[in-house]
């Protein structure tokens, strides 16, 4: 199967986009659906407990919160 992501280097570490929210540098999710999926993965993989999704006050994107 051909590599569909030719621009990605398999040896490079992925660093997600982030923005400052208060004193925290939070990961940016471009859609609510993307954030909700990330919350479910984190809850399952890291036993994080329930995470909520909220729209950022400083940009057109979403973040996760444990509150």
Image (cartoon, rainbow, N blue to C red):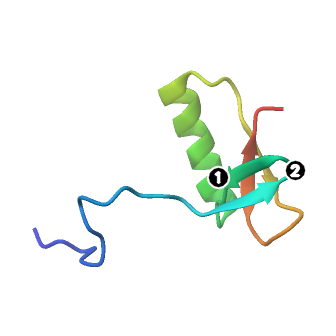
Alpha carbon of mark 2 to alpha carbon of mark 1: how far? Answer: 19 Å
Badge 2: few (under 14), some or many (20 or more) residues near its Cα, within 10 Å?
Answer: few
Q: Tell me the element at label 2.
A: loop
Q: Residue at x 83, y 47 (%)?
A: 23
Say above or below: 4 vs 34: below
For the residue pair 18 and 57, the one nearer the viewer reads as 18
Q: Which residue is identified by label 1?
A: 35
- Image quadrant containing the C terminus: top right
Q: Tell me the element at label 1.
A: helix
Dot label at residue 22: 2
Residue 44 falls left or right of residue 27: left
Q: Which image quarter: residue 11?
A: bottom left
Q: Residue at x 72, y 45 (%)?
A: 64
Q: Residue at x 54, y 59 (%)?
A: 16
Residue 1 falls left or right of residue 12: left
Give residue 27's position: percent from left, percent from top. Answer: 64, 54
Dot placed on the residue nearer the N-terminal end, 2 or 1: 2
Residue furthest front in the image: 23
Q: Residue at x 81, y 71 (%)?
A: 59
Give residue 61's position: percent from left, percent from top. Answer: 74, 66
Residue 32 falls left or right of residue 5: right
């Amino acid at each position: 199967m051909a590599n569909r992501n030719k621009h990605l280097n398999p040896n490079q570490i992925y660093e997600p986009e982030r923005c400052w929210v208060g004193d925290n540098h939070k990961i940016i999710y471009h859609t609510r659906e993307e954030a909700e999926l990330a919350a479910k993965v984190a809850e399952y993989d890291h036993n994080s407990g329930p995470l909520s999704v909220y729209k950022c006050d400083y940009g057109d994107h979403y973040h996760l919160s444990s509150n």
